[in-house]
Amino acid sequence: MKKVQMLIDGKMSTALSGETREIRDPGNGEVLALVPESAREDVQRAILAARRAFDEGPWRNTTALDRGKFLFKVADAIRKEAKLLAEIEVRNCGKPLAEAEFDVADAANCFEFYGGLATKIHGETMSVPANSLSFVLREPIGVCGQIIPWNYPLLMASWKLAPALAAGNVCVLKPSELTPLTALELGRILTQLELPAGVVNIVSGPGANAGEELAESPLVDKIAFTGGTATGRKIVLGATSSLKRVSLELGGKNPNIVFEDCDFEAAVDGSLFAAFANQGEVCSAGSRLLVEKSIHARFVQAMLDKIPRIKLGHGLDGGVKMGPLISAAHREKVEQYIRVGVEEGAKLRCGGKRPEGAAFAKGNFLEPTIFDNVIPKMRIAREEIFGPVLSVIPFQNETEAIQIANDTEYGLAAGVWTKNITKGIRVMRAIRAGITWINTYHPTFNELPWGGYKQSGNGRELGLYGIEEYLEVKQVNVNLDEGPLGWY
Ligand code: NDP
């Protein structure tokens, strides 16, 4: 059995207890690797290493140019190992190979984007009052605890590490206990790139204990979290005693609105992709499909006609478009929602069950599921299911579409399909969400800010906004007058 180690203080390391956890392929149940099962003491070791690296080490005083060059090296190294990383991501998360390849390429691009940005972190100067020179410096925050979920492990690791390092911070990253493998591979890659010890630490272990220690430790200056909204609340509570900075990327129940004047084929295809990419295990999934009544029946039928094209299977098998769910427990949670939908009176139009056949027997597979005639108050229209379940809600007119779209505690993402661009922009401006698409769904760019309104989080990742989350702002006043101030 392959034993994988974690990165602490520049060295690959086991847990102090020697304990390990089996990491399984959700497509066939195979044990892929044994990884260290960190306890609080392991995370404390990583935090101390990071603290030393920040307080005494060279990283934060390294020139921005050198930090940028280092991030370019990481991007190159990821590209060199892209095939291996994509394959590990498929085996560990269950996603189709094409999606994993895209994630790996995007992870490399993210390091490159922030490598370029490292040299563009500027302050400002002002003259207040006239006899002083005042300026504002942007400085790294310090030790950043970073906690990521299981749906996009390498990509989320990159979104966290790249801006933090570009800004001169040091990091302790904790991947999900279910999907630590690509993050740990990234740790191995980093050891080959001459990064000073302790600048990046990657610890595998459970959210309870390992994650909590990061949130609670007074030696951690900032916590950046991506995950469920309920966990986000716990992180905030854990961070309260030390009042560390917190940024949160949380869940969503995202509206995808289709008007009768859309490009019909494009909207059908895009709405299926919005709901079922990555098995629907996507925070920004278009899991609430709002369709104008005049085209509703025809639209749903067109989606049903296309469903057979979403081939289920192990992500490494040719032509597969949808893999297994992340775990048996998660599949049961999604199935529970399907039962709730039926009980609430929504019309199950396809899926709702496990696929039959030997190829699916050992994996956590579930058919793509569409509920029609969903009413906004139903639980399947309100709660994040985080699986391949689409709720279709018919609407009468633009005003009603906006009202339904905003009737949620979340505010992460939204889509609108219409050929009337004025209407598209008008509707988008009325929607309370941080990530929006018109006539497309899901494209994500390193250059643009990512994050939610309302209970979908606070702060932004990616783009210029993303680096601000990792910077402190310091004012410096230089008195240009000579002699005493003259107060006493
Ligand atoms: P969780 O919230 O369960 O876990 C996220 C991370 O937090 C994991 O590393 C987990 O560790 C850790 N964790 C769990 N409990 C604690 C705790 N008490 N203290 C500290 N850390 C803890 O989310 P999932 O992994 O289940 O991911 C799915 C969720 O993530 C969805 O709700 C989704 O919407 C959201 N998400 C949001 C994104 C965004 O950008 N807004 C992007 C991707 C996902 P462990 O796995 O070991 O329990």
Image (spheres, grey):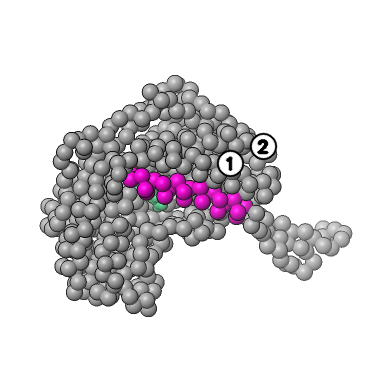
> Is residue 263 placed above or below 360 in the rendered structure?
below
Q: Looking at the picture, which amino acid does disc 1 mark? A: Val
Q: Residue at x 38, y 55 (%)?
A: 456
Q: Nearer the viewer, residue 161 or 399?
A: 161
Compared across the picture, whether 442 is left or right of 459 comes to left
Please report the residue visible at 18 percent of the width from the left and 74 percent of the height from the top: 294
Residue underneath mark 1: 170
Residue sitting farthest toward the front: 318
Q: Dividing the image into 4 quarters, which one contains the N terminus?
A: top left
298 left or right, relative to 172: left
In the rendered image, residue 108 lying in the magenta stretch gets the answer yes
Q: Is residue 226 above or below residue 465?
A: above
Q: Residue at x 30, y 30 (%)?
A: 30
Q: CA distance from mark 1 to mark 2?
A: 10 Å
State if disc 2 and disc 1 touch (CB < 8 Å): yes
Measured as percent of width and height from the top left, residue 430 is found at: 36, 71
Bounds of the magenta span? 94-118
Q: Is residue 307 magenta?
A: no
Local secondary structure at mark 1: strand
Q: Which residue is mark 2?
A: 57
Q: Is residue 74 left or right of residue 323?
A: right
